[in-house]
Image (tube, grey):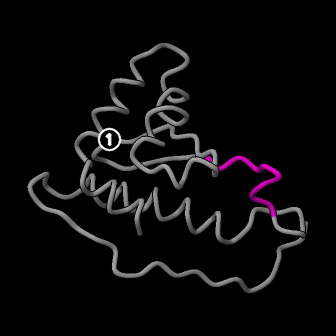
């Protein structure tokens, strides 16, 4: 919830930062993902999220499979997926509400049933 609160406080700044970084040819989304976004949510840096869209219409990010976010079954850990979902979902929610309003997530939950095969 700390990342969500940081995004809520700075929602307009995050959106402007993505638009500015995206204007850099070829490197724009990388600059935002690796340099700018960790300033707003430093606890999400280790996930390695790569943002490809962040505007009033929604947020899109990719979560690459890296060894430090894998579980013993060689798939992405549920905690990493929930953390990425928190950032992307809350970013989209904040982008959809008027700038003079704020919101805070009350609960984030996830369930793990079984590892998929194939």
Residue at image point 44% right, 15% down: 24
Q: Secondary structure at mark 1?
A: helix
Q: Is residue 100 magenta?
A: no
Q: Which residue is mark 1?
A: 14
Q: Position of residue 4 (x, y in %)?
A: 37, 62
**Mark 1 neighbour density, 10 Å: few (under 14) some (14–19) many (20 or more):** many
Question: In this view, which residue lies farthest toward the top?
Answer: 25
Closer to the camera in the image, 88 or 48: 48
Residue at image point 42% right, 59% down: 3
Residue at image point 65% right, 63% down: 80
Q: Position of residue 111 (x, y in %)?
A: 63, 84
Question: In this view, which residue lies farthest toward the left?
Answer: 100
Q: In the rendered view, would you say 52 is above or below 42? A: above
Q: How many marks?
A: 1
Image quadrant in which you'd find residue 23: top left
Image quadrant in which you'd find residue 68: bottom right
Image quadrant in which you'd find residue 79: bottom right
Residue span colored magenta? 62-70
Residue at image point 31% right, 48% down: 57
Quadrant of the frame with the C terminus: bottom right
> In the shown orientation, is residue 35 left or right of residue 74?
left
Q: Position of residue 89 (x, y in %)?
A: 42, 62
Closer to the camera in the image, 9 or 117: 9
Quadrant of the frame with the N terminus: bottom left
Q: Position of residue 2 (x, y in %)?
A: 40, 64
Q: Is residue 68 magenta?
A: yes
């Amino acid at each position: 919830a700390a990342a969500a609160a940081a995004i809520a406080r700075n929602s307009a700044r995050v959106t402007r930062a993505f638009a500015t970084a995206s204007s850099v040819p070829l490197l724009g989304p990388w600059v935002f993902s690796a340099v700018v976004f960790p300033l707003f949510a430093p606890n999400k840096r280790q996930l390695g999220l790569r943002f490809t869209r962040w505007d009033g219409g929604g947020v899109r990010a990719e979560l690459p499979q890296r060894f430090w976010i894998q579980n013993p079954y060689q798939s992405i850990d549920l905690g990493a997926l929930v953390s990425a979902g928190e950032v992307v979902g809350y970013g989209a929610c904040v982008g959809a509400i008027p700038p003079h309003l704020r919101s805070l997530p009350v609960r984030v939950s996830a369930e793990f049933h079984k590892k998929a095969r194939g």
